[in-house]
Amino acid sequence: MGWIASVIITLAILYLRAPDIWPARFWAEDLFAFLMHAQHDGIVSLVESNAGYLHTVPRLISLAALTFPMRYAPEVFLFFVLFFTGWAASIIARTIGGFPGILAGAALILASGWSEPVGSVTNLQWLLAPTLLLLSIRPGGVSKAEGIVFAMLASTSGPFTIAFAPVYLFVLANDFLKRRAINPPALIAVASAPIQLIEVMLYPNTPTPHGGSDAVWLFGRIVELSAAGGLVALLAIALCGVSVLVGTHKLQRALLIGASLLLTAIVVAKFRHDTDIFISGLAADRYWYVQGVIWLLVGFCAIRETGLVPKIAGVLAVAILVTSNIYTAGLSRVWFGVGGGWAEAVEKSYSSPVRFEYAPNWAVTLENGVIYRAEFP
């Protein structure tokens, strides 16, 4: 039952790196979109687009929160954050297996760009995406039923199935042609990609350019940022590349690396006029988070190999990526004191409308326990 150890380790590191998850509080779209839409639209909110794509998991959590008194909504949200983070860690542990798998779950918290994605319902999509990718490429260790449920939730929560569609298609075709087997997670991801793509086309959310240029330096930065935000990470990338040359499961690691490069190319194309996201240390580091998790997973998969070369390459790559991230981003984030007092605000709202401010500098209005939009930066 090594996956239990992986869950415990991952959640312990989560609290170490993000101690501000307690007391429970909201973040960004938690209130402004998901919980508010659940209150006003009910179950119909499940098919509503936000930021140009579907968000099944946050919307299900919001609907679940409505079954409890509104004053406890932050605690309900936190419970599901811990649940899905632990579930993702357990899937990673079981798909990789062994001692490397137990440690690999923590990649969700130790990857570059971790600061914003972890610890909130809004950003669970960032954790689910690399987990579903690994589950599709390396499906062993997880029951068929669990894999299907996870794939259905993850593939309709965020736009990542679009980015990884070529990889999912390859995995699906490869498994069928070589073993006459259907890969359910890959099949579900392939089926979900067009749905999310249609949502993106119907409800585009292209950022407004505000200067910058397509200078050549961007392409050095994308390689650097997609690994860990430091030039030393290039060595880790090279080591991951070496691990692809040998080993029983080298194709799996090659597909993970290919998926990371695909996502990086899409980020560059989408934000080529917004060069701020290519500067480490800004909030936009989240756009490099999924790639950071993938690189760590490549390293852990290499450690799981029997050969000495991939094992050494994997150990060095993981060590470099983790220490580089901690050195550049710090061991923990501290957002204490932002968005507290929800229960009191809910109680006061039954007497008169209340303005409630929460991270990151957003605000909603509460009236009789019902959420209305107030302010969006």
Image (tube, rainbow, N blue to C red):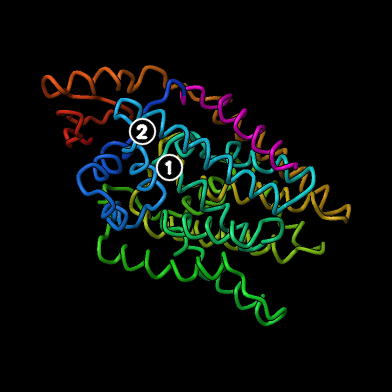
Which segment did they paint magenta? 1-21
Principal secondary structure, stretch drawn in magenta: helix
Q: Could you say which is closer to the camera, residue 210 or residue 8?
A: 8
Mark 2 lies on a secondary structure that is loop
Q: Is residue 7 magenta?
A: yes
Q: Could you say which is closer to the camera, residue 241 or residue 90?
A: 90
Mark drawn on residue 123: 1
| Residue occupying image coordinates x 37% and y 17% | 337
Q: Amino acid at mark 2?
A: Trp
Mark drawn on residue 291: none
Q: Is residue 310 left or right of residue 355?
A: right
Residue 145 lies, in percent from the top left, at 59, 60
Total marks in image: 2
Residue 154 lies, in percent from the top left, at 48, 55
Q: Is the C terminus in the top left, top right, bottom left or bottom right quadrant?
A: top left
Q: Residues within 10 Å of mark 2 (few under 14, many from 20)?
A: many
For residue 252, what is the image quadrant? bottom right
Asked whether the beta carbons under mark 2 and mark 1 sit within 8 Å of each other, the answer is yes
Q: Amino acid at mark 1?
A: Asn
Which residue is tagged 2?
27
Q: Could you say which is closer to the camera, residue 136 or residue 160?
A: 136
Q: Is residue 6 magenta?
A: yes
Query: Vertically, is 211 above or below 83?
Result: below
| Residue occupying image coordinates x 66% and y 46% | 296
Gap between marks 2 and 1 measured at Cα: 9 Å
Mark 1 lies on a secondary structure that is loop
Query: Vertically, is 25 above or below 199?
Result: above
Q: Is the N terminus in the top left, top right, bottom left or bottom right quadrant?
A: top right
Q: Is residue 278 left or right of residue 237?
A: left
Sooner in the amino-acid sequence: mark 2 or mark 1? 2
Residue 353 lies, in percent from the top left, at 12, 24
